[in-house]
Image: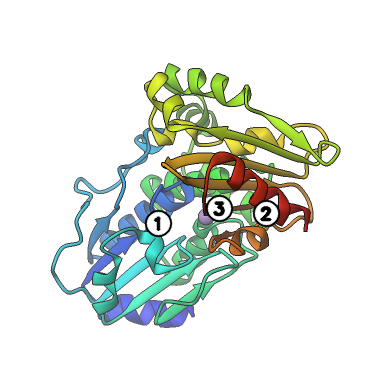
């Protein structure tokens, strides 16, 4: 697959790079690193993100211009990174179906193979890890800009090497990125130690809703639109709350239910060990990884919770 991607890059000039909505560190780091790699090869690269770069990742070096509207131009190839299906790019994704070549590079095991070329590796810790292999294959000499993006992609998707997807490659690549000048404490301070106060006020409200079921094996908490308003918070301030709830002793499955409409909730599920939350979420039309997945469920809070607990119990 790398050979095919190399051929596409060698024979093309104008490329388009994008990822999923609500981008995380792997999404942003992957997109930005590929941007630097393509430009270092003398190619032109247009970066499109439906959503703004979250505040945690604003320190990452990226293109001067990030498009938030899909330009009406044609590209030699469209790279879709860290994204399991086209609709996850966000509204307007239909325009990309017209592209003559779509290259999907991803590690979600629920990836539906939407690309013309699919570079998929569900065993990779992150899309950043797969891309590092590609850059090595392309023979690119990595700059600091590329390194800090790859490093951030890997540490955010592995929870700083704490999650089950952590593998020897993740460590090996990060060691190399350190030798290219990446400072772990600096990255960690920006990603994990630079939150607006409002995030903690919101967290306080959310933690008050925490309940456990099935002898503490299942933990559930919720966020309402009212909590966001009361604490002057936006959606990105709640990033990481589901992971936090998973830290409760004995918990195997954690679910955070975030209100996104009058009778609609976005569910973020996290698990420890063998429980596959991607399976649970796919019952509701969502997907993700074994230990981290998401979906939407319609209903009142009580109805949504009941559906979720029922599916989890099963
Ligand atoms: Mn990822």
Q: Is residue 5 left or right of residue 119?
A: left
Q: Residue at x 60, y 67 (%)?
A: 109
Task: Assess disc 2: are there few (<14), some (14-19) or many (≥20) residues with their C-alpha within 10 Å of its C-alpha.
Answer: some
Tell which tag, 1 or 2, sits nearer the viewer.
1
Q: Earlier in the sequence, mark 3 or mark 1?
A: 1
Q: What is the total number of numbered labels drawn onto the structure image?
A: 3
Report which residue position mark 3 lands on: 294
Question: Is residue 41 visible to us here?
Answer: no
Q: Residue at x 65, y 50 (%)?
A: 308
Report which residue position mark 2 lands on: 165
Q: Position of residue 224 (x, y in %)?
A: 48, 32
Q: Position of residue 173 (x, y in %)?
A: 58, 53
Residue reaching furthest to the right: 215
Report which residue position mark 1 lands on: 20
Q: Position of residue 51 (x, y in %)?
A: 31, 47
Q: Is the CB atom of the residue marked by disc 2 within 8 angstroms of ligand 1's nearest atom?
A: no
Quarter of the rendering containing residue 219: top right
């Amino acid at each position: 697959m790398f050979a095919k991607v190399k051929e596409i890059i060698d024979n093309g000039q104008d490329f388009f790079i994008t990822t999923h909505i609500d981008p995380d560190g792997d999404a942003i780091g992957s997109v930005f690193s590929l941007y630097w790699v393509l430009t270092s090869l003398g190619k032109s690269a247009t970066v499109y993100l439906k959503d703004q770069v979250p505040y945690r990742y604003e320190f990452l070096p990226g293109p001067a211009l990030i498009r938030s509207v899909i330009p009406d131009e044609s590209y030699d190839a469209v790279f879709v990174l860290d994204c399991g299906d086209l609709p996850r790019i966000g509204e307007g994704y239909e325009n990309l179906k017209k592209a003559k070549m779509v290259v999907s590079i991803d590690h979600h095991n629920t990836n539906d193979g939407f690309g013309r070329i699919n570079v998929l590796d569900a065993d990779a810790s992150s899309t950043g890890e797969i891309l590092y292999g590609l850059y090595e294959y392309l023979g690119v000499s990595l700059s600091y800009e590329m390194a800090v993006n790859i490093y951030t992609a890997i540490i955010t998707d592995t929870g700083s090497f704490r999650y089950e997807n952590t593998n020897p490659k993740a460590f090996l690549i990060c060691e190399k990125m350190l030798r290219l000048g990446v400072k772990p404490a600096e990255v960690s301070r920006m990603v994990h130690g630079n939150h607006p106060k409002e995030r903690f006020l919101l967290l306080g409200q959310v933690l008050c809703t925490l309940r456990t079921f099935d002898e503490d094996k299942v933990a559930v908490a919720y966020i309402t639109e009212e909590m966001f308003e009361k604490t002057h918070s936006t959606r990105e301030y709640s990033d990481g709350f589901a992971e936090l709830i998973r830290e409760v002793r004995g918990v195997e499955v954690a679910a955070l239910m975030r209100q996104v409409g009058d009778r609609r909730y976005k569910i973020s599920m996290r698990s420890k060990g063998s429980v596959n939350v991607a399976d649970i979420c796919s019952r509701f039309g969502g997907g993700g990884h074994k230990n981290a997945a998401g979906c939407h469920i319609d209903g009142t809070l009580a109805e949504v919770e009941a559906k979720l607990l029922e599916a989890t119990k099963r």
